[in-house]
Amino acid sequence: MSVELRPAADRHYWANEWLTSWQSFPATGNYDLFGNAHGVLVVHNDDVVAAGEGLDAHQHQNMEILTWVLEGAVRHKDSRGHELVMQPGTLGYMRAGSGITHSEKNADTSHRGERLRVVQMWVAPHSDGLEPSHAERDLAAALASGEPVVAASGRAEHRDSGAIEIANRFAALHLAQPRAGQTIELPAAPFGHLYVARGQVSVNGAEPIVEGDALRTTDAGPLTVTAVDDAEIVYWEMHAAFDV
């Protein structure tokens, strides 16, 4: 068993006039995404997008792309006819499969200047060339108790859980918003990635980790997480590495 802390300050940083991107895995520039993967997770960005800005239409293939909205609203449009606005508490999912073109932008085009903050995650699929698709799930009510919610999964055990079904049978995404003093448990996994999106938490009784920190676990048992203050965590439970 190993638990590796990746402090917030050690994340890869990239920015331009309208985007600030803190990356748990280097994703911009000439990087080997799969060489830097942990389990099947190859991208995990905490992005802030200025009002009215975002990515114009561009193409992806053979990747499972998940967008967790933390602040503001994101406008998604793709070549399969999906066009929608996702609010905080919504998880968006796009199966790039054999090829899809999409744009994602800050939906605020007013003069209020409301920023958009999302956690965007890429997971390798278990098969290439699948039919592209899109789905979304509003999790605000489900997260209100502070207990973990299986937000997306390709694992058979989660088939009837209401989770978004992803094309990786080895992975599941858990989200939680524990309140100060609340203790929750996350499942054991051969590969795990725990990210603190807000607040600070203690894991297995260790010193607290704070917003932007990540823990990468290998062959770990269940994780006991106690919120030091109101917090939000993103946890990938993975039962194989990307090259299976």
Image (tube, rainbow, N blue to C red):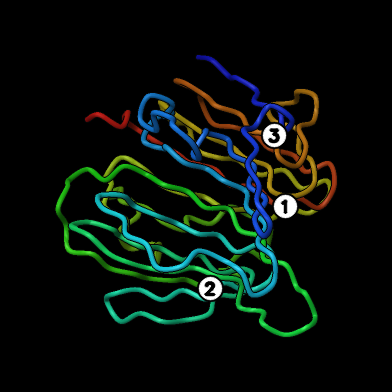
Looking at the image, is 200 positioned above or below residue 208?
Answer: below
Which residue is the site of mark 1? 178
Q: CA distance from mark 2 to mark 3?
A: 25 Å
Q: Identity of the amino acid at label 3?
A: Asp
**On residue 138, which mark appears?**
2
Q: Residues within 10 Å of mark 1 (few under 14, many from 20)?
A: many
* Quadrant of the image occupied by residue 108: bottom right
Would you say the residues marked 1 and 3 are in contact, meaning their CB atoms lie under 8 Å apart? no
Side of 2 where 66 appears, left or right = left
At x 76%, y 32%, the residue is: 209
Side of 212 where 158 appears, left or right = left
Looking at the image, is 128 positioned above or below residue 149?
Answer: above
Element at label 2: strand
At x 55%, y 60%, the residue is: 68
Dot 2 or dot 3: first in sequence order is: 2
Q: Nearer the viewer, residue 224 or 3?
A: 3
Residue, far front: 17
At x 46%, y 74%, the residue is: 76
**On residue 213, which mark appears?**
3
Q: Identity of the amino acid at label 1?
A: Pro
Residue 135, x across and y down, in percent:
37, 70
Looking at the image, is 120 positioned above or below residue 81?
Answer: above
Q: CA distance from mark 2 to mark 1?
A: 18 Å
Dot 1 or dot 3: first in sequence order is: 1
Residue 189, x across and y down, in percent:
43, 30
